[in-house]
Amino acid sequence: MQIETKLKEMGLELPPPGKAVANYVPAVRSSNLIFLSGHGPILKDGSLITGKVGADLTLEEGYQAARQVALVLVASLKEDIGDLDKVQRVVKLLGMVNCTPEFVDQPKVINGASDLLVDIFGAKGKHARSAIGVNALPFNIAVEIEMIVAVED
Amino acid sequence: MQIETKLKEMGLELPPPGKAVANYVPAVRSSNLIFLSGHGPILKDGSLITGKVGADLTLEEGYQAARQVALVLVASLKEDIGDLDKVQRVVKLLGMVNCTPEFVDQPKVINGASDLLVDIFGAKGKHARSAIGVNALPFNIAVEIEMIVAVED
Amino acid sequence: MQIETKLKEMGLELPPPGKAVANYVPAVRSSNLIFLSGHGPILKDGSLITGKVGADLTLEEGYQAARQVALVLVASLKEDIGDLDKVQRVVKLLGMVNCTPEFVDQPKVINGASDLLVDIFGAKGKHARSAIGVNALPFNIAVEIEMIVAVED
């Protein structure tokens, strides 16, 4: 349970994992890849970080939202695979920032997720990623991220 | 041909599959995964469901558009693998809703696709997914969805 | 080195590959799949093709931007796998066009990338893809594309 220990050392508590809502699920495994659904910045009390970066939220607030999304993704991942030490590699993120048409710092926002994943998983946390802007996200969440993770067989 | 029988029982007729246009194709297989291109809501007569949800289309119309996209995806899948009974799992959807910046019900729109896939494939149809808004889609289609499906070797 | 020879015959010089910035990397391999990060239209001198298609850029300029992105993706791919002859199949592109809400020719823009990949890799270059519009991209780049490629074991 090295990763769990790491999380404790970092003072991080995993939020509740994503829930199976309607006809989709938070994660699907195919061979050794886990495909995680798009997750949002849900806080411990169940509330969401909402608003458009560049209008309602600053860059720093966007960064914190992306960091929170990563934490929820890790919670869903743990729920799915049981033991986070099984992670071989965070393969890929698609990070979507709810923003104004003028906002151009999507990478600095999604760094909030990337930084946390590398803090938690070390070299195994280094991933390929795309960071893009979109004009609207569910419930007006600030950031949505989907993730692919390779795990031990 | 259980899935085909199911489709008949549901009164569903598959629309024409996506066509290979220019230098890309509707589906590519790699190992046991089928990666399906982004598809749109093409109706039987070849016309498209167009418009932005939240302005030109209601939520319910968006839902129906997403459902139609799923039907076209299933048609392309059948064209690629021959027999829909080979489907082991619908792994992942990325659902994009052409919408206004104020629209926040992307999940309810993409449910149109998720619901149909579970109606058709049962537990094998339960997938990971992302639902996002975008400001523009090809030909002004209301919804575009790409899909990854795991099939028997 | 057939593909390298082909590039030379086409008069194409690969631009510098994507760089590992912060906590993500240009490409991650999992089994025989290479997941490439979202790349942008970086020119040889390091400058970027920027602007929104439909406002700042014409369709043709968007096409050229997408073509340039594909060239940068191929450069990153070569950096990762060493020899481009190892490519078995370009599996999938997700092509995002920075555009106005009225722009509907995203497929014609992303053709710039698809055409180049097929010119370079022939039948192995034919891929599944999605072409979508977004309201904003990093540094205001005109086009961002992520790619999945299957390579020899």
Image (cartoon, coloured by chain):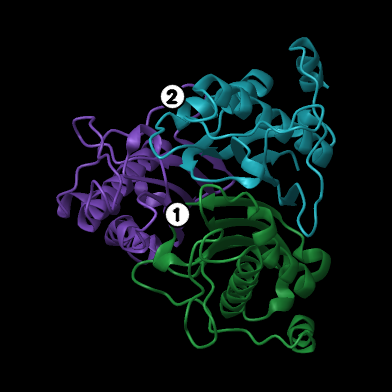
Chain colours: A purple, B cyan, C green
Q: Is residue B66 visible?
A: yes
Q: Which residue is mark 1?
A: A93
Q: Relative to residue C5, is residue B129 depicted above or below? A: above
Q: Is residue B147 visible?
A: no
Q: Are marks 1 and 2 in contact (CB under 8 Å)?
A: no
* Side (left or right) of A79 relative to B67: left
* Side (left or right) of A144 relative to C125: left
User: Mark 1 falls within which chain?
Assistant: A
Sequence-wise, the earlier of marks 1 and 2 is: 2
Q: Relative to residue B99, is residue C1 depicted above or below? A: below
**Location of residue A121 by image quarter:** bottom left
Q: Relative to residue C47, is residue C106 depicted above or below? A: above
Q: Which residue is mark 2?
A: A21
Residue C96 spot, x, y in % from top left: 55, 56
User: Mark 2 falls within which chain?
Assistant: A
Residue A3 spot, x, y in % from top left: 29, 52
The mark tally for this picture is 2
Q: Residue at x 74, y 88 (%)?
A: C11
Label 1: element kind: strand
Residue B95 spot, x, y in % from top left: 55, 38
In-front residue for pair C100/A38: C100
* Side (left or right) of A70 relative to B135: left
Mark 1 to mark 2 CA distance (whole Å)? 22 Å
Residue type for callout 2: Val
Label 2: element kind: loop
Residue type for callout 1: Leu
* Side (left or right) of B98 relative to B8: left
Q: Residues within 10 Å of mark 1 (few under 14, many from 20)?
A: many
